[in-house]
Amino acid sequence: MFDTIIWGRVTLFDLIVSMIILLATALVAKGVSLYLKRIFKDKIQLDHLSILVKVVSYSIIGIGLIAVFALIGIDLKGLLFAGTFAGVVVGIASQNVVGNMMAGLFLVVERPLKIGDQVEIDDVRGFVEDIRILSTSIRTYDGMYVRIPNQTVFTTKMVNYVFNQVRRFSYNVGIRYSDDADRAISIIRSVLDAEPFVLHSPAAQVFVHKLGDNAVEIMVRPWAPVTEWYSLKMKLLWEIKKTLEENSIEIAFPQRTVWFGDGTNPSPNYPSSGKLQEGPGEQE
Amino acid sequence: MFGKHTVPFVLEFEGAVVSVQPENGHLIYRRQGESGVLEKNLLHHGKPLHILPVEPVNLPKNITPFLMIEFARSIFLGSKIEETVYVSFPYEIGVFISARKPYEVIDIFSLATQKYTLYGEPKSGLVCRYWKSAVFSKEPELFPLREGIIHLTIKNTTADWVEIRKLVLNAFGMKIYYDKKRVVQSAHMKIVGPRSAETDLLVSPFSRAMNKSIELFSLRKQIISTTHVMMRDGI
């Protein structure tokens, strides 16, 4: 009975198998769609999710149809030729669009950035406002709207300033050579300890980093939550400066000691050489 | 200090004065402290205010629900042993107004020091409110307006001795109780590996006479999926 010819060389068996394949394909497509919706429900926007689900679902159904065509003897060569030609034409015409779309899909899957993140892409810095299927929009720090094609987002170097939970920033604080650097470090540490958003761990680093021309340079490297680091950075340097000065430690500034050719000497502690010299840079 | 207060009133905390006084026909809520003066008009005449201990996750800014308590001395615990210790925790003080329910928070302040830390790695770790505590074998007497007491049960389910240096709790699930002398809560820590543990908060006052405080997260109608924390980055 299964050998009964239905049409051309297609038997009843082929027809039943084809229907089972189509049914199975539809079920798999539905299952994968539901799975994708559940996995990405809270991770990507609904419109993006809808596109992703449709692309994957139709792809699965397409594969099922090709299998059924092969089974029931429909020659795909003609379709293949027409499809190839159409594909070349459409592909040339829309390679950028397709490229951006694929890059958009990869961005959704890889998730190097999300809405609200602070990023730098292709020399544009700002907040991610939206990630669409073809482009990503950025609101720059000075309030401008910039649309960047997803292909650019995907292929150029991107810095996500808030990808991790915490980040470090640094200051270089220059004090006079006459000041006690150990005491300055202790005072800076007390300022950092008093600030809630300077993290206890990873601990801040405070150390003499350089004996400069004009100052003993102290490096200050605190860690902060990514949501708070910039407001902290704006606030903390001035706090450090004020607290150091309250404790009679001054911020050094560039200076030069000049020796006059007529033998007059600005400081009795230095021998007169009768030459112009650069001093040690210490602030008097 | 904690509980319902009929207006007008003046209360002195350590370093802060909280008052509600009539001025020009209005009731003025005022809090004076080191950080300055906060004033609010209360147009809900004559209704009492509730001053209660709340979860330590609001000040200076609500950026995390997690509280990490580092022990001043680490705890060594043998295999398959369950022990109870007491540690301190910071809390904040909430001022609530209500005619009936729901309560509305009008001010939150704290006398405890505020510090944050990272538990785990920068990419996947947890930003936590940080607190350092001694470990007590019996209920300690602490500064009651600055710190509360956690009744902590630790169970070592592993086959080896473990060293415990810290505890991470989900402050959004805190059940805080208070009486005239103390602010308390209970928590459980189950050691499941040499570097990992599960922690959870328990609904358990130290005595039946204690009052339960208001949970801020429930006031804000935040959905809390879980109150337990899986500590995977060290204990």
Image (cartoon, coloured by chain):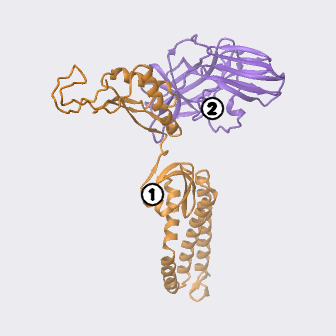
Residue drawn at x 47%, y 43% as measured from the top left: A164
Categorize mark 1 by other alpha carbons within 10 Å: few (<14), some (14-19), many (20+).
some
Which residue is farthest bottom? Answer: A8
User: In which quarter of the view is residue B63 placed?
Assistant: top right
Query: Taking A53 as reference, is B230 above or below it?
Result: above
A243 over B136 or under it: above or below: below
Name the foreground residue: A24 vs A180.
A180
Q: Nearer the viewer, mark 2 or mark 1?
A: 1
- Left or right? Give the position of A172 relative to A145: left
Marked residue chain, label 1: A
Q: Dot 2 lies on which element?
A: helix
B102 in relation to B149, above or below: below
Q: Position of residue A63 (x, y in %)?
A: 54, 72
Amino acid at circle 1: Asp
Q: Amino acid at mark 2?
A: Phe
Q: Chain A rendered in what hue?
A: orange
On-image quarter of the N terminus of chain A: bottom right
- Answer yes or no: do the residues labelled 2 and 1 have beta carbons within 8 Å? no
Measured as percent of width and height from the top left, residue B90 is found at 58, 22
Q: Nearer the viewer, residue B117 or A281?
A: A281
Residue A27 in percent (x, y) is at 62, 65
State the SS at label 1. Answer: loop
Rendering colour (chain B): purple
Label 2: how many Cα within 10 Å (few below 14, some 14–19, many 20+)? many
Between the residue at mark 2 and the residue at mark 1, the CA separation in whole angstroms equals 40 Å
Q: Which mark is residue B205?
A: none
Q: Chain letter of disc 2?
A: B
Q: Which residue is mark 2?
A: B172
Residue that badge 1 annotates = A122
> Dividing the image into 4 quarters, which one contains the C terminus of chain A?
top left
